[in-house]
Image (cartoon, rainbow, N blue to C red):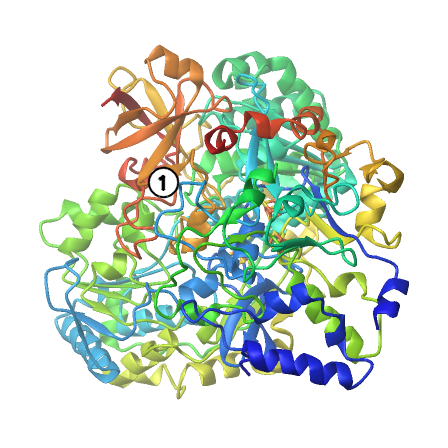
Amino acid sequence: MKIGRRSFLSFIIGGAAGTALSPLAWKSMDDSSIWSQNWPWTPVPADGEVSHVNSVCTLCPGGCGITVRKVDDRAVKIEGMKGHPVNDGGVCILGLSALQLLYGPTRVKAPLKRVGERGEEKWQEISWSEAVAEVAAKLGDLRSKGKSHTVCSILDSDKGTVPYLFGRLLTVYGSPNFIRTPSIQDSYELAINLMHGVQASAGFDVEHADFVLSFGSGLIDGWGSPVRMFKANSNWKDSGSKVVQIEPRLSNTAAKSDKWIPINPGTEVALAMGLAHVIIKESLYDSDFVNNYSSGFDKFKQLVLDKYNPDNVAQITGVDSSALVSLARNFAHASKPLAVCGRGQGKTQGSLDEFIAVHALNALVGNINSEGGVWAVPDPDYIKWPEVEMDSVAAVGMQKERIDGAGSETYPYARYLLNRFSGVVNSEEESPVNALFVAGANPLYTISDSKAVKEAFSKIPFVVSFSSYMDETAKNADLILPNHVFLERYEDVPMPVGLQKHVIGLSRPVVKPQFNTKHVGDVIILIAKALGGRIADAFPWDNYEACLEETLGDKWESIVENGFWSDPDFKVPASEEAFNTPSGKFEFIPANLKSPLDFSPVTIEGSDISYPLILVPYDSMRLANGFIGNPPFITKTVEDTVLKGKDVFVEINPKTAEEIGLIEGRYVDIRTPRGKAKVRVHLFDGIMPGIVALPRGLGHTAYDKYIAGKGINFNELIGPVEDPVSGFDAAWGIRARLTKV
Amino acid sequence: MKKEVKNEKAKKYGMVIDLDKCTGCGACMVACMSENNVPFKEDESNKLDSIAWMRVYKLTNGKPFPEADICYLPRPCMHCEGHNGHAPCVSVCPATATDYNHETGIVSQIYTRCFGCRYCMVACPYHARYFNWWDPVWPEGMEKYLNPDVSPRMRGVVEKCSFCFHRYQTAMNKAYVEGRRKLEEDEYQTSCAQACPADAITFGDLNDPAHAVHQIAKPDLKHGGRSSNPNAFRLLERLGTNPKVYYLSSREWVRRAGDNYLKKDKTVKKLH
Ligand code: SF4
Ligand code: SF4
Ligand code: SF4
């Protein structure tokens, strides 16, 4: 009902004469004028019936429950869902802005086929059946030529029905190339795999920890499930739990911690070993756990005692040895200490040594799989589809080595190595990838060394994007098959990152699809059916919704009712049964590792002579830097010392700035071995001299005018540094030079 | 009807923001924009014309590395009571477009009355008021998310945080329909307080001893509402504006900055 001014006034009169309980007489004139005014030239949002729908946000791996307020069929506001096991009523800045993505100008409104050059943005709208037929024809052709293994999929997750559908299609079609985008999940999974002998994700019982030692993790800058971490942080304040933050830059997390310990960047691994030295030397470790449930302790002990005494470590890390000793004691004496790592929001994998060292610290204090500690959480096993039956082509294809080398002789431990992808493609005359599918990911923006990634993409003959938005990858694709936005579709969202519980959230259609989009799950099923044979047989469902409902089985009703399903009885096994290593115990020195780790800091790219400074990235909640670009509301909150007009500011210590003669606001060229950019200078006392920092999340070349063309994408300035053991990208920064312009 | 209003104990809605918990994430700013139909432009990096009813400021302690420290300070409208409702802005408005509501303690802004003289903006020591230099424009389709409870504003008028007054109205309407006079604490919550993922913002009736804001802020009503909580402070307390937004910080430099940070703030210099 629209109420114009005149009808509103008569409405009041009518009301006042009517029931004595009418609220309207309560309204002062102020209120009614606020409420009733409208101008013909500003939009008048139509009033209507208010309702609320519970769903799950999928804009990051956090898995927050949301409650969407609707007026008739419009979604008008996103709020955190009360009582949700992840976020209990809170919501982050990105989740709050999701309606700008839903209704915004960046949506891909129909299936599009490229007609101009790649990236030229000349598209032709096609029908869904044409789109599916085109993909199926391409896949059929490759398969008939025995090239099924040259098809590759990049997704942001490998959990849940949609990634499983992708994986299933690849398997039965005959390609081993399912790639998950990189994050610290890779390193945590591998550390747990090697030390526990199980395939599991790391869960952190942050709610119960009383001393949190963070090796640069942005606990309140978006690490883990952001809203959950914010709440935990506030609980730590209330309960008096301590947080110690180790990193060279005063991040928000460092500022809010009880103690900030600046450290030479990249040397965190040495500090962890130094702490282990003190804990072992002073016998502060949990002897029950170490003696009964661990193996390799003596070797580990020897290593840390030989090489990591506090003075040595102080030399490497720049952390004062007495501070180190007292930190080790405080950590070990706490009743529920917890050490975590993975820099910033954890978007790059990091070095395996560091994760092993930090995980060893947790083991020393006996908090593995225990209250307030780190848990090895296996995936919930609700997806129980029958094994696929492969034909001979698929069987041959599946025997081929992966494009990214993961699982090969050189990289036996890694499961996914997207960081190696562009290197491999670019090193060969003809691209070893003939078709690439990208869903829920934007590798052209998020993977480091953008130039190389772009080159690799341009060599791949057939690129299909399933993005709902015109992001960088979609813009450079041959075909865009736009998925519904999460507010328009059903999807299971299992395993919110970092949670030590089993929770499956359900995204559901809050509004009907706004455009001619299609659920990616449906598209996969259609493609499979079009390919026929064993491939079609592997997809017996009529559509995605039927598949989802059948998969969730007896959980379906409760998940629809509550918006999520959680397992109240979820527990990890006791230490007697938790480890599946060769020794059957927790392994300080993993026996499954062929070569020993050397726990030395990762050397970054560039010589210190041509590049006297070190450039590191920083993550901020106000700059979404994953596969979703900043919606306009969030960009509005970015400070003018981070972004001004189109210019991004590089943070530099005033001392360093003085040495090179720079003042606040000055334009400079920043150069690294991988790229260069024009930026402005912001003096910041919170950053270690000699280091400069740029935010991640800017420099988009796609999306809309509210974010594109502002600042620089950090990934254009940095490239991967391969971890020698895992093959992960261990780069935490790159050497750089600033010159005045 | 009027008589009943008078008998009702006056409410005094206010806020306590715990700066130890605030992460500077900015969710409150967006929660506000999205609830209150605040528009946006292609470039919002000129903070003088960037409308943000809630703005999170970054304070620094001014010390060099490694003693440097930062703290975020979210700033809604302070809904100053001044002395007996004489908020700085209310006193200067020639159009009575902004008024102090004695029933709720909320300082209103009536856009239809405002003719854009901007005296109130000059008078407000907190820079909580913003002027619409342009008519709002939403990209095609985006007007779908606009909230019907709050009217979009036009060029030429001043706007500011209303403590989400429309939510009060909605809650009161509901209570009245159900035959109640009194709102439960959780029935009327602002959008920012509700959204804050760190639970840093507490909102409620400062006059009601059962409400959390009262218990935390412990306002001394005889002394202009000054807090008796040693960690609590209000911005520019000594001006006598008697704001209804209290801040908590365990760090002394932050509490001190609360009384003069605006003097150092660059935007102040530029505005005057
Ligand atoms: S933290 Fe992640 S899942 Fe939660 S609301 Fe924000 S973007 Fe969505
Ligand atoms: S939402 Fe909460 S934590 Fe985030 S900036 Fe606002 S007050 Fe601070
Ligand atoms: S109280 Fe409401 S209007 Fe004021 S800042 Fe918070 S959300 Fe905005």
Furthest-front residue in view? B94
Q: Is residue A365 left or right of residue A688?
A: right
Name the one closer to the observer, A576 or A79: A79
Quadrant location of the C terminus of chain A in the rendered image:
top left
Q: Is residue A390 left or right of residue B134?
A: left
Q: Assign ligand 3 to one image quadrant.
A: bottom right
Question: Visible in this render: residue A205?
Answer: no
Furthest-bottom residue in view? A542
User: Residue A290: x percent and y percent?
Assistant: 68, 36
User: Relative to A672, is A716 above or below?
Assistant: below
Seen at 23% across and 64% down, the residue is: A149
Name the one closer to the observer, A80 or B271: B271
Label 1 residue near ligand 1, CB within 8 Å:
no
Seen at 84% across and 57% down, the residue is: B10
Q: What's the chain of the residue with tag 1? A: A
Seen at 23% across and 48% down, the residue is: A453
Q: As shown in the figure, which amino acid type bears the numbered disc 1?
A: Asp
Seen at 34% across and 53% down, the residue is: A706
User: Relative to B54, is B31 above or below?
Assistant: below
Q: Is residue B98 left or right of residue B216?
A: left
What is the tally of numbered marks visible in this picture?
Answer: 1
Residue linked to disc 1 = A729
Quadrant location of the N terminus of chain A in the rendered image:
bottom right
User: Residue B174: x percent and y percent?
Assistant: 74, 75
Name the one closer to the observer, A428 or B232: B232
